[in-house]
Amino acid sequence: MLQWYTTFLLIFLCSLGHAASILIPMDETQSNHLKAYGIAYFTFQQEMEVDWLLNYRGGSFLIDHSAAVMGECEIRGVSYELLSTAKTQALLQEIASPSVNMNAIKMERAPKIAVYSPKNEFIEDETDAVIAVLDYAEIPYTLLYDEEVLLDALLEFDWLHLHHEDFTGQIDRFLWRESNFMEAKMQEATAHKMGFTTVSAMKFEVAKKIRNFCAAGGYLFAMCSGAETFDIALAANGMEIGSGDPYEDDIDPVIQKGLDFTKSFAFENFTLEPGHSRRYSDINTGRLSFYQPTDEYFTLFDFSAKWDIIPSLLIQNHEHVIKEFVGRTTAFNKDLVKPEALILGENSDAKRVRYIYGEFGKGHWTYYSGHDPEGSPGRGRRWYLDLNLYPHSPGYRLILNNVLFPSAQKKKQKT
């Protein structure tokens, strides 16, 4: 009863003009960091703007006073504070000061989000960390897969996610479960339906569609093997990498020599691994056992919030040292990262990078290695993840930074 009365009083005072803004703090005082991103998205849906306060209390959100937003915070369990006009102006003046590494970035639209994922009874949505966190944060999205991408469905979206996917078409490499076998058969059926003789040929055409989506101004966010194999497919440029036998398949030296690294987004000079390997290439520096326990961490870099706006936006967090998590592609080989790619986070040995960003054409891409930021080694890939247990996950916050990325108005730097 007291909580209801407090909420009613806050909304009433807001309606009388005693509060000018709603501050959603993203530091340790926040009761649910992940759902706070959903509040920002909800605000866009109300045709309202959000100021993303870079480096202020963990990357907080500032919103004009709204009974609807306050009510939604209460429903979703998200902490917020009411600020008067004077306090709001003082806060923005503090952030604008050249003496502090902060910035206020205006966000004003809800990006249309697509997730590249199979849609069938053999694939459980919770195996994709991005699907899991979008559901938890209550941010809407659309599932797309090969057929929809080939039919140009990406033209309707701003942001696309790729996860544990093989864009090289080597569908036999990971067939240790019946569900993988059924998935392979379904991909073969789709390839034939769409007029391709092999899955590899279809996946390359899909990769080209995604590349063009990015070149035209789209935002690409790839995790795990989705990032590694997408780059391999682009560099292979239509060459058939494997014959389909994971136990006998060695990499043809002609194929290795024929890789065109000018076509890949993030990586160059990498070496493909044979079909019997549990790695696609030496891009992946992770353990051969996907679920081998680890006590290691990776660290996010610091950037100038006033000048390096995009990387500052992408690393917003209440923690900057994050526990390592594994996957098909656990970490990226730093020696193979292109010089024009920007490293956002790396392991303590500085040889393995976890989080990188770049631009392609008019668009942007981010690669984030590993499968599940709160994954428990040894539990298996299809284990259901309950994000109610991890509302403050710094690893999942990096995903949601990318989800809101297209909403931000990037200020042009002075020349």
Image (spheres, helix red, strand yellow):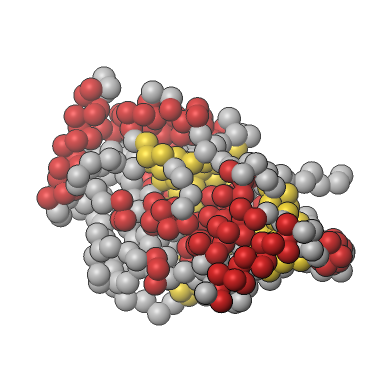
Q: Residue at x 44, y 77 (%)?
A: 296
Q: Nearer the viewer, residue 114 or 274?
A: 114
Q: Residue at x 12, y 50 (%)?
A: 178
Q: Is residue 184 above or below residue 269?
A: above
Instruction: Please count the marks in the image.
Output: 0
Q: Nearer the viewer, residue 362 or 117?
A: 117
What percent of the width, then of the height, locates residue 370? 40, 61
What percent of the width, then of the height, locates residue 252? 28, 40
Q: Nearer the viewer, residue 321 or 318?
A: 318
Q: Residue at x 72, y 46 (%)?
A: 410
In what quadrant of the picture does the C terminus appear? Answer: top right
Task: Write down the quadrant of residue 161 in the picture.
Answer: top left
- Visible residue check, residue 184: yes
Q: Residue at x 79, y 58 (%)?
A: 17
For this orientation, the residue located farthest to the top is 195
What percent of the width, then of the height, locates residue 138? 46, 53
| Left or right of 193, for residue 345 | right
Task: Write down the quadrant of residue 85 in the picture.
Answer: bottom right
- Visible residue check, residue 282: no
What percent of the width, then of the height, locates residue 13? 73, 64
Q: Nearer the viewer, residue 232 or 249?
A: 232
| Left or right of 34, for residue 126 | left
Task: Write down the quadrant of residue 345 in the picture.
Answer: bottom right
For this orientation, the residue located farthest to the left is 178
